[in-house]
Image (cartoon, rainbow, N blue to C red):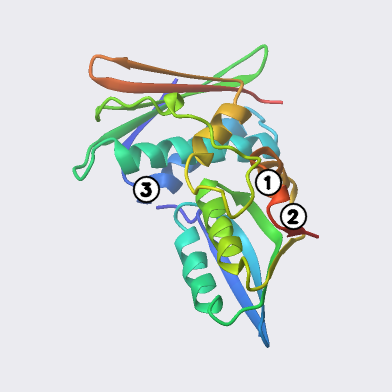
Amino acid sequence: MSSKSHLDIKVNKDGAEYTFLLNGRLDTITSPDLEAKINEATPDAEKLIFDLSKLDYISSAGLRVLLGATQAMEDKGEMVVCNLTEPVKEVFELTGFSRLFTIK
Amino acid sequence: MKELIVEADRMNLSEVQAFIDEQLEEAGCPMLTQTTIDIAVEELFVNIASYAYGDGSGNAAVQVSVNEEPLSAEITFIDNGKQYDPLAKADPDITLSAKERKRGGLGIFMVKNTMDSVSYEYKDGKNILTIKKNLN
């Protein structure tokens, strides 16, 4: 298998605020890793920040994980997505995800 | 036309995408278009890997040809699994709020809306799905 499908996830915790820095591709293969890390954070998180400046690919599998995160934060906090690259921005606009969370 | 035959297993996704990318790069496909095609390839291949053979296993063939004037790629996915037309599924409502949103259906929706044409046929016991995209 080639190393094409790869995602580095850095998580920074500042009190109840979690920042996820994603570097690589959020696809069918890598999205379960991110989902697991989000699930670890959400019980006590009040704010989730996703820095996508180094994410150059997202498929529906990745969208499902982000949707799950924003649904988990409903009524208990806030979710912010920032620094979208061009390919990710196109996917967000096409699927209406640009309207689902705060984008900076 | 070039063809890759692999077991319909999501772990083979990278191999399928690398195969497609090689042809697209050779054709001088712009990066953003390549990413768009890669996403469509993922959605369609993972769909086959997830549903075509139920709990069993089988192969998927991926064929790609690049045509000139206009420069375009045609990619066909073939499996021998159960008859299933993914295009028949209703589109998700993308105007709903996060709370009301369902998790499924976005993959095929993206394929339909990013490719220049998408067609499905069931022939001789095979599901045949073809996408076409101009490379500009």
Residue reaching furthest bottom? A15
Q: Nearer the viewer, mark 3 or mark 1?
A: 1
Q: Are marks 3 and 2 in contact (CB under 8 Å)?
A: no
Q: Nearer the viewer, residue B60 or A74?
A: A74
Judge whether A40 appears above or below B109 on screen.
below
Query: Chain ID for label 3?
Result: B
Residue A84 - label: 2
Judging by the rendered image, the residue that carries numbered circle 1 is A92
> Which image quarter holds the C terminus of chain B?
top right
Task: Give the structural element (helix, strand or loop) at label 3.
Answer: helix
Whether residue B26 is situated above or below residue A1 in the rendered picture? above
Give me the residue at 57% from left, 50% from top.
B100
> Relative to residue B80, is residue B75 drawn left or right?
right
Q: CA distance from mark 3 to mark 2?
A: 27 Å
Residue B40 at x, y percent in the picture: 53, 35
Query: What amino acid is at disc 2?
Result: Leu
State how far apart marks 3 and 1 are (Cα).
Answer: 24 Å
Q: Which residue is mark 3?
A: B10
Quadrant (top left, top right, bottom left, bottom right) of the N terminus of chain B: top left
